[in-house]
Image (cartoon, coloured by chain):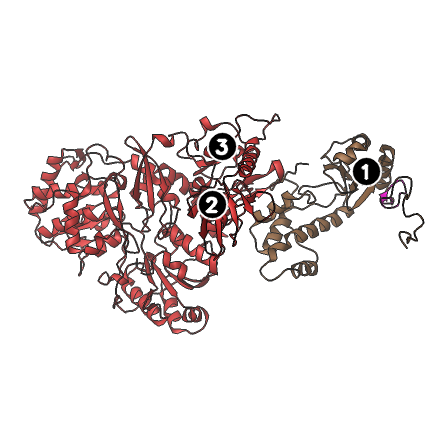
Amino acid sequence: MKKHLDLHAAYQPQSFSFRSAEAVKDILSRYPEGRARSAIMPLLDLAQRQVAEDGAKANPPYGGWIPRAAMDEIARIVGQPPIKVYEVATFYSMYNIEPVGQYLVQMCTTTPCMLCGSDNIVKACQDRLGIGLGETTGDGKFSLMEVECLGACVNAPMVQINDDFYEDLTPARMVEIIDLLEQGKEVPVGSQTGRLNSQAEGGGTTLKDAKVRKSGT
Amino acid sequence: MPKLTIDGVEIEVAPGTSILQASEMLGVEVPRFCYHDKLSVPANCRMCLVEVSPGPPKPQASCALACADGMVVKTNSEMVHKARKGVMEMMLINHPLDCPICDQGGECDLQDQAVAYGFDRSRYHESKRAKVDPDVGPLVKTVMTRCIQCTRCVRFAEEIAGTPDLGLVNRGEDVEITTFVEKAINTELSGNLVDICPVGALTSKPYAFTARPWELRKTESIDVHDAVGSNIRIDARGGEVMRVLPRLHEDVNEEWISDRTRYAHDGLKRQRLDRPYVRDAQSGKLRPASWEEAFSVAAEKLLSVKQGWKAALVGDLCDLESMVALKDLMGSLHETNLECRTDGAFYDASSRAGYIFNSTIAGIEQADAILLVGTNPRREAALVNARIRKTWLNKRVKVGVIGEVADLTYPYEHIGTGPADLENLIKSAGGFAAVLKNAKNPMIIVGMGAFQREDGLAVQALARQCAETFNMVREGWNGFNVLHTAASRIGALDIGFTSKDGFDLGKVELVYLLGADDFPMEYINPHAFVIYQGHHGDAGANRADVILPGAAYTEKNGLYVNTEGRVQMARKAVEAPGEAREDWKIIRALSAYIHRQLPYDDLFQLRERIAREWPHLMQIDQILPAPWTVFGLPGKVAGTSFVSAVQNFYMTNVITRASLTMAECTKVFLHHDVAEAAE
């Protein structure tokens, strides 16, 4: 999805500061002296998570994104010109550089998911939420975003909502997930059909007689 | 020392040499877009692919691969050709086919290399992507759709200019170069972005749609807008200078020039003096006259005013020959009231070491501690500043400043603002004094701002004391440097165009101004008769009683001595407008009118005359090392702060004041400057 960075947009807050100076210090300490530039990526992530924490409490809620003020603050912290931070933030799709909903639904439509019917999943979401890709619902709860392969092809089709993967989706289950999230209820992450990790659909087919430890024990 | 074979030829190179550089040494041409020998190597265009064995069976980017022993490199094999063709096809996917309306056409790397590696048709059926063009100021025009993302401009802005405003944002097909905040690229070197851009994405705004490269007559010359003496190429069509480009000179300007050098030439077309004028006795107004009449009027005054009551001043843009001719002319009248320091700077001109940039500009790279006194090199000599920045980038040279606080593009320690702080520095042991003391090659750069004050001579003595205290002058190293702002100054000082005891401009009865405009005309006795010889109708011409129209730097052959004392030869690119003539010829003709004909009939005889008295001024591109002697006049210094000699980079002489481009730059950049200073 094409990202758009608008430095002067009305939604950009005037200032930003990290809540936890300790966390910033911890990140900076991971890199050698004079290499603070390397901390740009973890600091961007920290900023995005901090905004998400604030957003979850707000009314209407919003999700994690990185305001310009945060990028400028990071540039100041690592001693780089702001453009160097903008470059990084605009390059990676996981940094949101404009406001998103509380639940950012990243929908994989790359070949394996597409072959398994991701188009129907996308359509189900759009119909349920009444928004298109790259848009956010009016209540600030959901954003839809089309992304490239997230690496869970065996359990296609799948989406990523905030930090979690939801796999083996059907259009009906997708709508259910959205309903549950909207009501603030818990949804089990991972495969929605109860499949163990990425085993074959009908259960394990090989090494049946081997004494394998059960998953989760 | 790795030894390798390139296209069947064996070569031994220094460790760390890239294959591309080694190929160049052999004269093997390797196409490239992103690689530039003055910038860092990102290896992102992939055009310079070569076949290397031993190694993986795939083409390698030769710009980023260091030579190793026993390598066998093929730059012309079938695999290489196929690979480069693939790269070229990728680049052309989104590159518009607008060469006929592109200013880069005819001197475009992409166009040239597409001839060798391009396909004759496109296999791409999708729409091409288009980009929004950011506005980056009045000098650089952007057409970002043409950009091939080589990032040379990003690296130039960051590494050479020291203003990291440009960046490469987004990714994949959406990637684009932008300032993001859409602010003007605030550097004195922004014009160089146009040169380094291998395609037509960044082109010159003032030059847009005015000429094609094959229509231009190219003349290699020397710049006069500052005292650096940048090597330039003047491109002219007919009688008009169309553009100015840099020429490589590693010891002076490398391959950059400042924006004033590049863009002020439109001032050569405006406000020109294209015929002689004489002030009408009745109306008190200037009226056009013939050369004969102007010479007669001037000669009559030159002969009637008594000896000792005449004076001659030379300005900032004069060539050496005309100054020598004027000195000879005044000498024939036994007149010694000569002065070239029209900028009001007081310094001892008796010792050459006391007024030149002894370390040389390239010598800055050897320095490990630099003290700037009363100077803002970024505004006064942008390329000297670029050299200091280069040294800072290479080895974090320590810089101390006594003078104005300004953004110099590298960090420095601000020690103080006035001469008293220099005195204290000499006496102290800690702080920057310790840095200078421990440095192997310490250096002081004194700007005109340190001398343009009543106590200039005392400051000069203080600077000398500083150089001696911190052991800046020894066998093989002279770290005492004066940074001048005028192209003519060192030449004038070398030929002794100065008066020992001084004279009062308010009392003399005749003043001969040779291109001297940059001082308050009120200093001249209101009843004095003023002869102005120059090329622009500026302050001097306004005050003049006789105007003799001369030639600008693009219109005459001449010698200039830069702030290092380097003698360089400028060449004539176009004819002077109208009846204007080369300056030395005017003075030679005038000498006949006062019956003291100067003994040279052409430029060569004049240069022979110069060589007889000052042999070093005929050693082109040479610097005569100056012996270290006592100079300056120790005395009491004032408590006032130093003020940089150049406040507005874009307006420093008559040509820039007549230039519309420079006026636009003043509006855009200086306003920005003011905003920054207020923060």
Residue that carries the numbered disc 3 in the rendered image = B114
Residue highlighted by disc 2: B8
Per the image, label 1 sits on a secondary structure element best described as loop
Q: Nearer the viewer, residue B101 or B258?
A: B101
Asked whether residue B236 appears in the rendered view, the answer is: yes
**B368 or B123, nearer to the observer:** B123
Question: Which region of the structure is painted magenta?
Answer: A187-198
Of the pair B93 and B305, the residue shown nearer to us: B93
Q: Is residue B508 above or below residue B196?
A: below
- A198 vs B82: above or below: below
- Check the image and report above or below for B541 versus A21: above
Q: Chain of mark 3?
A: B
How much space separates mark 2 and mark 1, taking CA atoms? 54 Å
Q: Residues within 10 Å of mark 3 (few under 14, many from 20)?
A: some
Which chain did the renderer colour red?
Answer: B
Q: What amino acid type should be assigned to the residue bearing mark 3?
A: Ala
Answer whether labels 2 and 1 touch (C-beta < 8 Å). no
> What residue is shown with label 1?
A156
Picture quarter with the N terminus of chain A: top right
Work out which quarter of the rendered image holds the C terminus of chain A and state it.
bottom right
The x and y percentages for residue A52 are 74, 48
Q: Is residue B584 left or right of residue A86?
A: left
Q: Residue at x 89, y 51 (%)?
A: A215
Q: Is residue B565 magenta?
A: no
The answer to whether residue B674 is seen in the rendering is: no
Residue B250 image point, x, y percent = 37, 51
Q: Say whether residue B675 is left or right of residue B94.
A: left
Sequence-first tag of 3 and 2: 2
Q: Colour of chain A?
A: brown
